[in-house]
Image (tube, rainbow, N blue to C red):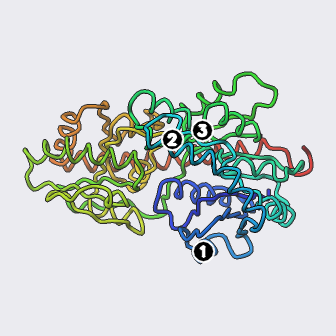
Amino acid sequence: MKIAMFSAVPPVPAHEGNRSRILALSRAVREQGHDLSFVWLRAGDDSSGDRAAIIAEFGEDRLHEVWPEGGMAGLLFFLRWLPRRLARKLCRVLGMPKGTYARLDERARYGWRRPIQAVMETVQPDVVLIEYVHYSFVALEPRLDRASYIIDTHDSYSEQETALRSGKARAREWMFLRPGDEVAGFRRADVILAIQQQEADLFRRQLGSHPRNPQVAVVSHFVDLSAPPVMEHEARRALFLGSRNASNVRSCRMLIDQVLPLVLRTMPDFRLVLAGQVCEAVEDHPAVLKLGRVGEVREAFVMAPLLINAMVMGTGINIKLLDAMAAGVPVVSTETGARGVPERFRSGIKVCPDGDPEGLAHMLLGLISDSPQRRRLGHSCRADAERWNEEQHAQLRAVLAALPAGGDR
């Protein structure tokens, strides 16, 4: 099948979880023999993607860049959303929950319609794969009767709202959709991909009984198994890996403030290694080694072949945990950090209940002091990652096989 993947998030460089997801899903689609074109929705001065690397990944003839037309269309877009954005900014300053809600099509641009239509006419896709419900407007501009539409959700925005209302997140840390807007976006598609089972169940409850409901399927993240497992080096180190988003920053600070002192009390020469942009958002500490952004996560695992996945909040699935499994690296995690990973894939993961820094410190110390156990858990992680990929490929294959062939809709 011909598949057009629409994304405003560039998949290369894949230094954040959402980019890794997009890149891995695109590769899985191509591994299954489909002809995939990557459509990069661009706006403003977007320099966050490596264009040359994206061309190297997909091929120059498979990359389509969609820039919004300027002139009056751009001005109308700006004027339409300006009052709402100013009002929301005021609400955010005041700490009001209303300031966290985006509108469903707020990221749509008037000037994208004709460029999107031109791409559709060029590619003639059988399947249009849209990254994030925020960009579901692609299914309307213009909708091809011959094509099936899939939305890859990444996260549940209702779950983010639940976190806000339960006090796990502050109003200024999130931007999410109201559940009604999320459902409206879902109903533009034929299939919704949830990244984990709990979110698939939530989406089905949200959608309820409606004649225009899409199919909801689980296709989780695909892990990279091309490299051999990491060999153990520094035994008295553990890694926290993450971007600079609110979930990672709050979790990392909890780890440094509440867990690290307990570990150092027993093991003074222990060092916590940080990798990713989270390094820029937390204060320096004598027992913390900051690697900054790394080209490949494997580089970080070589420096500290034990992942401490002390997440205190978040939605979707924790991609760094899956990366550790693929690298054959054992994991100590909170329950929130292990969300979306079923028990049958946790044989190399030690899970501590949320809100228990003493328990995390105890698990971490026990694993650091026991080399044979680390090796056993690492082997189990790698085996689980191999089975995990097989299951995700089977589920993706089933989703695509169930779609009608081009022209048969």
- Vertical side of 137 occupied by 76: above or below: below
Q: Is residue 85 left or right of residue 298?
A: right
| Mark nearer the N terminus (2 vs 3) | 3
Residue name at image x 27 percent, y 47 percent = 253
What kind of element bears circle 3? strand
Neighbourhood count class around disc 1 (C-alpha, 10 Å): few under 14, some 14–19, many 20 upward: some
Relative image position of residue 243 (x, y in whole percent): 41, 56
Residue at figure coordinates x 13%, y 45% from the top left: 261
- Residue 384 vs residue 365, the one in the foreground: 365
**How would you rate the neighbour count of disc 3 (Cα within 10 Å): few for under 14, some for 14-19, many for 20 or more?**
many
Decide which of 227, 263 is in the foreground and name it.
263
Between residue 60 and residue 93, name the one nearer to us: 93
The residue at the far right in this view is 407
**Residue 294 placement (x, y as % from top left):** 38, 67
Question: Which residue corresponds to mark 1?
Answer: 51
- Residue occupying image coordinates x 40% and y 36%: 169
Instruction: Calculate the distance from the C-alpha at mark 2 to the C-alpha at mark 3.
Output: 15 Å
Q: Identity of the amino acid at label 2?
A: Gly
Report the amino acid beneath label 1: Arg
The disc label shown at residue 316, or none:
2
- Which of the 4 image quadrants contains residue 399? top right
Quadrant location of the N terminus in the rendered image = bottom right
Establish if 375 lies above or below 182: below
Under circle 2, the secondary element is: loop
Q: CA distance from mark 1 to mark 3?
A: 30 Å
In the rendering, which numbered label is found on residue 177?
A: 3
Residue occupying the point 64% across, 26% down: 206
Residue 297 locus on image (x, y percent): 40, 62
- Hey, which residue is sitting farthest top in the picture? 209
